Image (cartoon, grey):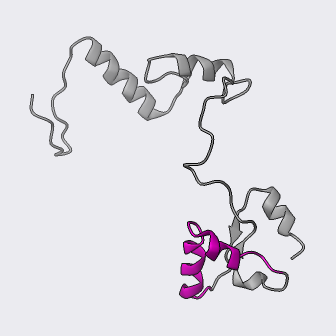
Amino acid sequence: MRNRQQYIDAGFDAWILKPIPFDRLNKLMEAIIDTKVREDCLYQPGSWERGGWFHLGQERSDQAATQPTGEAPMSNPSKEAQEAAESDDPTAGQGDSTDERDVEHARLLQNQEEGKTEAPGDDGSEQPPS
């Protein structure tokens, strides 16, 4: 398969072509947790149509290093992203949005801050008890 490396470089762990027999699909799914089964399902030249795994896998999640590195997980975040991450405002990072939901959300937040309550709508929806 000439594009195999391209798929691997793009981050694919495995491939499945349709239609696929359910017994083969079950075996490929079992290979997620069973390394011996995964070995049997590795790519072999001439067997592309069977589907399988490109590599033996990575460390199990309980073996992975999870200690913080001390580095920011995102390099060079935008000013807006930094402000939104630091803010307690639920609308942070939305800027001057003109989305109707955002406008309505801002209106409801303003009413809540002012202690206003609204009567139930005419759409028949139930309102929580006060």
Magenta highlight on residue 38: yes
Where in the figure is residue 81, as x and y percent of width and height?
62, 23
Magenta highlight on residue 42: yes
Q: Is residue 6 above or below residue 115?
A: below
Q: Residue furthest right?
A: 2
- Residue at 74 percent of width and 84 percent of height: 49
Q: How many marks?
A: 0
Where in the figure is residue 31, as x and y percent of width and height?
60, 72
In what quadrant of the picture does the C terminus appear? top left
- Residue at 77 percent of width and 76 percent of height: 43
Quadrant of the image occupied by residue 15: bottom right
- Residue at 43 percent of width and 27 percent of height: 103
Magenta stretch: give its range: 20-44
72 vs 127, nearest the viewer: 72
Left or right of 115 in this view: 33? right
Quadrant of the image occupied by residue 112: top left
Left or right of 91 in this view: 96? right
Dominant secondary structure of the magenta stretch? helix
- Residue at 57 percent of width and 70 percent of height: 34
